[in-house]
Structure formats: C-alpha cells, structure tokens
C-alpha cells in the first residue's frame, strides 16, 4: 500500500475543503459588508450626482464631504448626540445594577417561590414587544413623564434576557466558594462584588455592550414618548433630516448622518469583540 499517495490525496482533499470554506466565508463577508460600503459611498456623493444616476454606480470619482456638514447644520445633530450619550450611559448603569442583583438573587439566594418567580420572569420573554410598548406608553403618560429623560430611561432599566444570561453565568461559579465566603463572615453583597463579578466579567461586558447598542439604536420608544426636540435622540435626528432638513429626497445627507451615528458602535464592537464572544460562549455553557 502506497501510504505517501494516500497522504497526498488526503492533503489535496483538505486543501480543497479549506478553499471551499474560505470562498463561502468571503462571499458571506461581501454580502454582510456591502450595505456598509453602500452607506459610506452614498454619503460622499453629491446631491445632484446621486439624483442624476438612473443606474446606481458602485464608485464615485468626485467624492464630497458636504453631506456631513449638512447633516449637522440641517438639524441639531450635536445636541441629539449628547442626549443619546446621556440616555445610553444612565440606562446602562442602572440596568447593570438591576440585572446583576436580580441574577445573583436567582442564582445564589434561597427564598420561597424562587422557581415560580424564575418561571414567570422567563415567560415574560414570550410577550410581544408591541404589547410592552403600549403598556409602557400608557404608564409613562399617566405619570406625566413624557418629554423627560426619566420617561426615556425607565422602561429600559431591566431585561429578562440579560438576567437569565447572567444567572446562568453566576451558577457556573462553584458553590464551595460561596460556602467558604459565608464561613468567613462575608456578606452577600461583598461576595458578589469581590468574587462573582470579577469571575463573570466577560458576560458583564457583553451585556453592557449589547445594551449600549440597543440604547444607541433605539427608535420606536423615543419617537413615541418625545415630541420635544430638547429630548430627541440621534434616531429622531435622522428622521428629522428626512422630514424637515432638506426634503424627503436628500438621501446622501441621511446616509452621512447614519455613518456618523454608526461609527461609535462599530469602534466599540471592534475593541471589545473578543470579550463579547467570550461572554456569550461562557453564558451559554453549563457545567
């Protein structure tokens, strides 16, 4: 038996399989990245050249950055950026406190009705978001919190999914550590802060980044609860450019605003992508 020939055939087969995999991944990458390329390309086309294209072109020989200037001068996009930053930071900070304490209670503390409460919490994930939005809108309106940061923030300070994800992560920490800490007289809060949170830092970072993205991209709720420009977010700004800035046809200016708004999230994900993947993988692994 010619082992060298068999080995050569195996190597050729392996190279062929890798080639097919890389081709498929390359194709998938092109499909995923093309919308971003088209967004940036449209943002650097002039208004006249964009509207004169009967057939869309995939490049431009005369790029312009006037659309970016127009995006900030047509509406108060800078103020909307500041509002969005405040909304995102405050909401995420409160959410982390609520989610961490709730996940710790479900993972480590023993109290009557615990399993029933966990079941009820998980069942909330089956309720359509539309029903939750309607309920939140009625509640915030009755409380007189429309056109306030409190009205924007309160409905977003907790998440059943994040509580469940972090609870599963907390339960992976050995019980022996908790028992040893209790023997030493360590309080539950100190154990959570000194032991649980450092061990589960990747999941906490993942939750933080996902919530930042969710808050930054919020559109439906801010549009419902605010009609005062002083509390508009960047999502409102894009719609305002479309409706009030230059008319409904200035797509390049809208794309310029979208590029500026998307850039912080892209940078954030690129910086913490490894921690996000590690946090999701750890949260979904038991044992």
Image: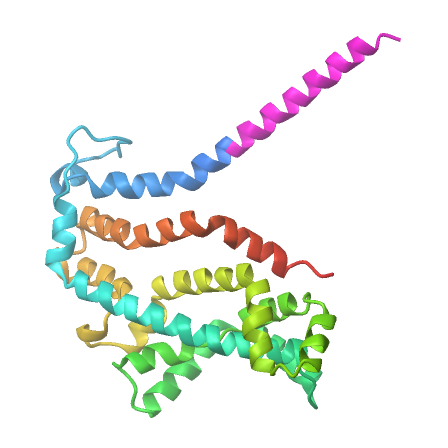
Q: For the view shown, which residue lies furthest in the front direction? A: 184
Q: What stretch is highlighted in magenta?
A: 1-25
Q: Does the magenta stretch include residue 4?
A: yes
Q: Position of residue 235 (x, y in %)?
A: 28, 63
**Residue 127 visible to an observer of this rendering:** no
Give above or below for 151 relative to 174.
Answer: below
Q: Position of residue 275 (x, y in %)?
A: 51, 53
**Which residue is painted at 18% across and 74% down in the image?**
230
Q: Does the magenta stretch include residue 40?
A: no
In-front residue for pair 129/75: 75
In-front residue for pair 36/130: 36
| Residue 186, picture quadrant | bottom right
Give above or below for 262 relative to 215.
Answer: above
Q: For the C terminus, which image quadrant?
A: bottom right
Looking at the magenta stretch, what is its main secondary structure?
helix
Give above or below for 211 relative to 178.
Answer: above
């Amino acid at each position: 038996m010619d082992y060298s020939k068999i080995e050569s055939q195996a190597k050729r087969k392996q190279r062929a399989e890798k080639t097919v995999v890389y081709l498929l991944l390359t194709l998938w990458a092109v499909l995923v990245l093309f919308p971003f390329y088209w967004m940036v390309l449209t943002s650097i086309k002039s208004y006249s050249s964009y509207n004169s294209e009967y057939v869309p072109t995939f490049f431009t020989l005369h790029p312009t950055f006037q659309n970016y200037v127009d995006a900030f001068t047509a509406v108060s996009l800078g103020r909307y950026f500041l509002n969005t930053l405040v909304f995102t930071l405050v909401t995420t900070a409160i959410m982390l406190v609520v989610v961490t304490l709730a996940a710790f209670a479900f993972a480590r503390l023993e109290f009557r009705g615990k399993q029933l409460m966990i079941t009820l919490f998980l069942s909330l994930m089956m309720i359509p978001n539309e029903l939750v939005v309607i309920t939140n809108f009625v509640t915030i309106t009755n409380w007189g919190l429309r056109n306030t940061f409190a009205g924007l923030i309160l409905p977003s300070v907790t998440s059943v999914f994040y509580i469940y994800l972090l609870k599963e992560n907390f339960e992976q920490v050995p019980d022996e550590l908790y028992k040893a800490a209790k023997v030493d007289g360590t309080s539950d809060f100190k154990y959570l802060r000194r032991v649980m949170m450092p061990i589960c830092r990747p999941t906490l970072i993942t939750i933080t980044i996902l919530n930042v993205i969710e808050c930054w991209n919020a559109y439906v709720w801010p549009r419902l609860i605010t009609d005062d420009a002083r509390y508009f977010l960047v999502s409102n700004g894009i719609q305002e450019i479309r409706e009030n800035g230059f008319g409904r046809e200035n797509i390049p200016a809208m794309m310029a605003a979208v590029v500026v708004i998307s850039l912080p999230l892209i940078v954030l994900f690129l910086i913490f992508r490894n921690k996000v993947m590690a946090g999701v993988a750890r949260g979904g692994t038991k044992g």
